[in-house]
Image (cartoon, rainbow, N blue to C red):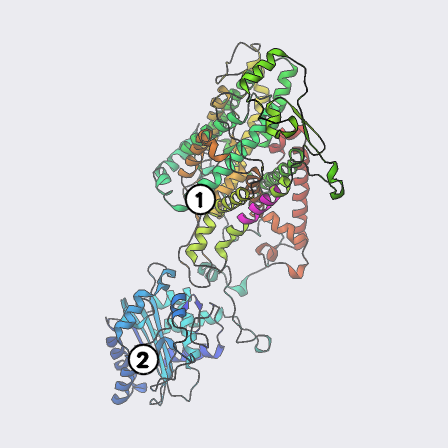
Amino acid sequence: RWIKFEEKVEDGGERWSAPHVPALPLHSLFQLRTCLQKGTMLLDLDATSFKEIIDKALSGQPKEAELQPALRERLAALLLLQPQHQPTKSLLQLLAELGLSPCRGRQPSCPTGHLPAASRPEAYPAAASLSFQLRNRFKKKLLPGAEAAHVAVGEVEFLEKPFAAFIRLRCAVSLGSLAEVSLPSRFLFILLGPPKVKAYHEVGRAMATLLTDELFHSVARQAEHREDLIAAIEAFLDELIVLPPGKWDPSARIPPPSHLPSPRRRTAVDPLDQQPPSNGDMTAAGDRASAEHPRSGEELERTGRLFGGLLRDIRRKAPWYGSDFSDALHPQCLSAVLYIYLATVTNAITFGGMLGDATANMQGVLESFLGTAFAGFIFCLFSGQPLTILSSTGPVLVFERLLFSFSQDHGLDYLEFRLWIGLWVAFFGVVLVATEASHLVRYFTRFTEEGFCALISLIFIYDSLKKMLSLADAFPINWQYRLDNVTSYSCTCNLRRLFNPILTCLTTLHRPPFPPYTTPAGLSRTQCLDRGGHLLGTSCQYVPDVTLISFLLFGGTFLFCTALKRFRSSHYFPVGVRKLVSDFAVILAILASCTVDAVLGLETPKLLVPSELKPTSPARGWIVSPFGANPWWVCLVSAVPAVLVTILIFMDQQITAVILNRREYKLQKGAGFHLDLLCVSLLMVVTSVTGLPWYVSATVISLAHMESLRKESATSAPGEHPEFLGIREQRLTGLAVFILMGASVFMAPMLKHIPMPVLYGVFLHMGVAALNSIQLMDRVRLLLMPAKHQPDLAYLRHVPLRRVHLFTVIQLLCLALLWVLKSTTAAIIFPVMV
């Protein structure tokens, strides 16, 4: 059978072979051409049953090949016998049949001839075949609207010369149990002849291969004369690739390729007429099927009117607004919500803690939670690209640190100064939207996009590893531990302190008394610290195994995520199970790691979530006053640093938007560069007034969001890779993520059981996945690979290898420069350097 690729019944007759590319003898195609030239040809035949088709085929023979009436009747009786299909049995059925048949070899040949398994006549009722069709689960692999074509070939002893017929029905009809699954049929090919000719089977394989070829099938559906089919075979022969017999084993099975050329590419250019490129331009090595710039759509065209681009974005996105919610009704979206929620919570805690250190808790973890929830929710509700996830970023954190230090050194109120900077940034952002400055995005090249994405991915990888290494400070590893010195390790509770009668009285009232017959040496660590004591000894700070198990959880979560994500393309379990496991890969990895942590019972560092709605610093409120604490001229001077922040926000936001709106993601609802920038600018006003962190698009988390919503074809032929259909574009996953962020304050008792090393492992997975998604990593691998082992990449066919290596080395040098710049106080200008 053929469903794009050939499958054969194995020698034992128990199962189908693995799908493979059919390898045809060249002579079989010539013989097939002869059969079509001299045999019976019925195009647009009106028939509703298989018997009617056979009767008209036998009566429509050319005069020079017409059969005798007796032979015609015998041939019709043979063709009308019920076919035997290769059964597809479940594992339970196979186990039940073990031992029932002592011999499971080939069945004896049919006395009426030697026909393939798909057309071998058997005398059992048609109802059994029809029942088999209804139970056959193979139909799930077929696309809607699929049709069956039937090829019947074999040797018949009572014929003296071959009988060949090609039949195309005017309307596809169901032919009962003739097909393995219940599908309408349009094409039939019959070739029967005397045993002295041995090529029938190969001619039938050639016909089946031609019918699965998209170009030949298209011609066969529209052909009006015999010559049209002959011309289609000639065109097929023109594209044929011949393998020398001494260099290839004909019995070898060629596995299906991962990518197939489209019919448009096959008909566009003759392979013999292709000319090599005149120069080694990297742009030419890209997608040659499209001469248009990948971002030259109407999203970035200037209208020449104030807010013209914004109005165009609104008109483009408004018709899709309803479907942005209905398209989210899919189990995959639930997995994406949980995945991105945990990633966003971890990011908010990480940046909230660093903001608290940089600003003396004027902004902390709680402000980070509330700001992320509010800004993300509003952005997902009104933005042009709701798949974008907002978050605090490294350059913004550097600016906050510098601004706080400047305010402290010059006696200025930090939050008020920051308020005016935020208002100026919002004003400049609105000006950029009004003047359609986002059209500059069309000049961002692959060099810029990959540099920015690689830097952010490396930051995620570096920060996750840095956080794990810092665990050794809180839970130190006793490198000097020696088994022989175990007797010298001790830890005792010291309750000695200055005597204070009032304090002693309060201690007696508020703390439980000593347990009876308990001395300070018998107190636990918690009891000792509760009573104001302190621990003395060489082993007091040693917590065994916590650092080790933390690294095991960290690495295990990363490996679990990676392995389960790749499970979709594995060969184990049915397709539905693989898709479900792959969609929920991150959630399953987190649950598995949390279970291991709970079973071991060690006190690993856990997720800390604020449980009270009050500012981190008691010196501030929820609303920042614009006047009073600073001189009046501060509101004017704030415009100077605001220009730098505006450039930072614009570049960070738009580079991320360019990466998310790449053509290879097959987005259908369009981008909204101007609308996104307006939303970010207006959110700057709210977050500045309330003293919350500033937010901009987070590249890595947004890419993870996109990857978690990938759509692939639900049905694919055996051996065919699922086709990438695009991204599930909707707003509901982002809205749900940020609603859960806001509710996290009330879910603290549940979230506190998640170990931080597990979330750092998710961070590492996100960074590695984003890094592997860019072409730069492929070209870095080429640097370390001998030329003979390099993969057959498209750009290597058109660009000299030295130019590819030069391009890669320049990118790596610029990436190293950006990394050094990021590590200094000049990190605020790194988006400009990109």
Q: Is residue 662 magenta?
A: no
Instruction: Indicate whether residue 560 is drawn in magenta.
Output: yes
Furthest toward the front, the residue is 517
Q: Nearer the viewer, residue 273 or 698?
A: 698
Q: Residues within 10 Å of mark 1 (few under 14, many from 20)?
A: many
Work out whether 65 lies above or below 232: below
- Give residue 665's mark: none
Q: Judging from the image, what secondary structure is the residue with disc 2 in?
A: strand
**Kind of residue indicated by mark 1:** Ser
Residue drawn where x is 42% and y is 39% of the image = 733
Whether residue 555 appears in this view of the structure is yes
Task: Name the spot of residue 699 as percent of width and height, x first.
Answer: 54, 38
Q: Which residue occupies 26% across, 74% down?
A: 126
Q: Which callout, 1 or 2, points at the residue further toward the start of the chain?
A: 2
- Asked whether 813 or 135 is in front, the reply is 135
- Chief SS of the magenta region: helix
Q: Position of residue 112 (x, y in %)?
A: 33, 86
> Viewer-proximal residue, 590 or 578?
590
Image quadrant where residue 378 sits: top left
- Measure how far apart labels 1 and 2 are at the Cα level: 50 Å
Q: Determine which quarter of the picture holds residue 811.
A: top right
Which one is nearer the viewer's eye here, 802 or 716?
716
- Residue 576, given in percent of the width and then of the height, sits at 41, 55
Query: Most extreme residue toward the right, as rendered?
Result: 484
Range of magenta residues: 550-561
Residue positioned 62% across, 11% down in the render:
501
Q: Which residue was labeled with disc 1?
A: 335
Q: Quadrant location of the N terminus?
A: bottom left
- Disc 2 packing (10 Å; few <14; some 14–19; many ≥20): few
- According to the picture, the residue beneath numbered tag 2 turns out to be 122
